[in-house]
């Protein structure tokens, strides 16, 4: 049943994502994408995993802390893209995203049953979840080690 749900939701994402390709699908640092379909295609091509960051960028304190202490640090920016395609799935309250992006993020939130923020979901290139985490204290090296623990236990 879960497999059928994933297939249906991926179909919806492809439908909504078609309009996002070519749009501003990457953040200014070029590491974080916002277009899930494009990120998934890149992950398949490069044989990488996806790191999905479900965040509330303008209201979630723990999200801001994770971004500041880990994601914005040079070590993370250098090391994480070796294994992961980074995808930011934002749920802002003070600003609005493009409608297609909002629908994509809502569909993904439902697909992965997100119940709180930040939610970091690790998936294979096809979108199958193999780990979930959130904020972890200790800075970028500790966080990278934390992620690698999940990767080591993942059997594709």
Image (spheres, rainbow, N blue to C red):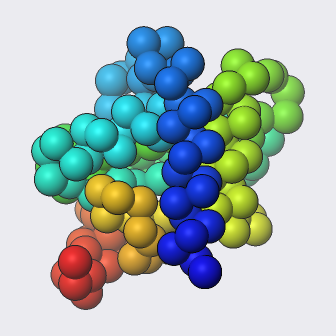
Residue 79 visible here: no
Q: Is residue 14 rendered to the left or right of residue 61?
A: left
Numbered label tally:
0
Q: Nearer the viewer, residue 67 or 30?
A: 30
User: On screen, 152 above or below 20?
Assistant: below
Quadrant in which the C terminus appears = bottom left
User: On screen, 147 above or below 103?
Assistant: below
Which residue: 31% across, 79% down?
150
Q: Is residue 13 rendered to the left or right of residue 149?
A: right
Q: Is residue 125 rendered to the left or right of residue 88?
A: left
User: On screen, 137 above or below 85?
Assistant: below
Q: Quadrant of residue 123?
A: bottom left
Q: Quadrant of residue 41?
A: top left
Residue 67 visible here: yes
Which residue: 55% across, 46% down?
11
Quadrant in which the N terminus appears = bottom right
The residue positioned farthest toward the right in the image shown: 94
Q: Nearer the viewer, residue 86 or 129?
A: 129
Residue 7 % position (x, y): 52, 60
The residue positioned farthest toward the top in the image shown: 23
Q: Nearer the viewer, residue 54 or 35?
A: 35
Q: Is residue 6 rendered to the left or right of residue 146?
A: right
Residue 42 % position (x, y): 25, 38
Residue 19 % position (x, y): 55, 19
Residue 115 % position (x, y): 76, 68
Which residue: 68% across, 49% down?
107
């Amino acid at each position: 049943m879960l497999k059928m749900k994933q297939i249906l939701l991926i179909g919806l994402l492809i439908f909504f994502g078609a309009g996002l390709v070519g749009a501003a699908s990457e953040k200014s640092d070029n590491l974080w994408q916002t277009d899930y379909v494009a990120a998934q295609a890149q992950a398949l091509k490069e044989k990488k995993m996806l790191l999905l960051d479900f965040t509330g960028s303008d209201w979630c304190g723990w999200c801001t802390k994770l971004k500041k202490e880990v994601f914005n640090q040079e070590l993370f920016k250098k090391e994480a893209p070796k294994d992961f395609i980074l995808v930011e799935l934002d749920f802002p309250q003070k600003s609005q995203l493009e409608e297609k992006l909002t629908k994509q993020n809502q569909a993904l939130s439902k697909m992965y049953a997100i119940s709180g923020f930040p939610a970091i979901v690790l998936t294979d290139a096809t979108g199958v979840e193999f780990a979930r985490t959130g904020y972890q204290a200790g800075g970028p090296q500790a966080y990278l080690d934390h992620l690698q623990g999940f990767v080591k236990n993942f059997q594709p």
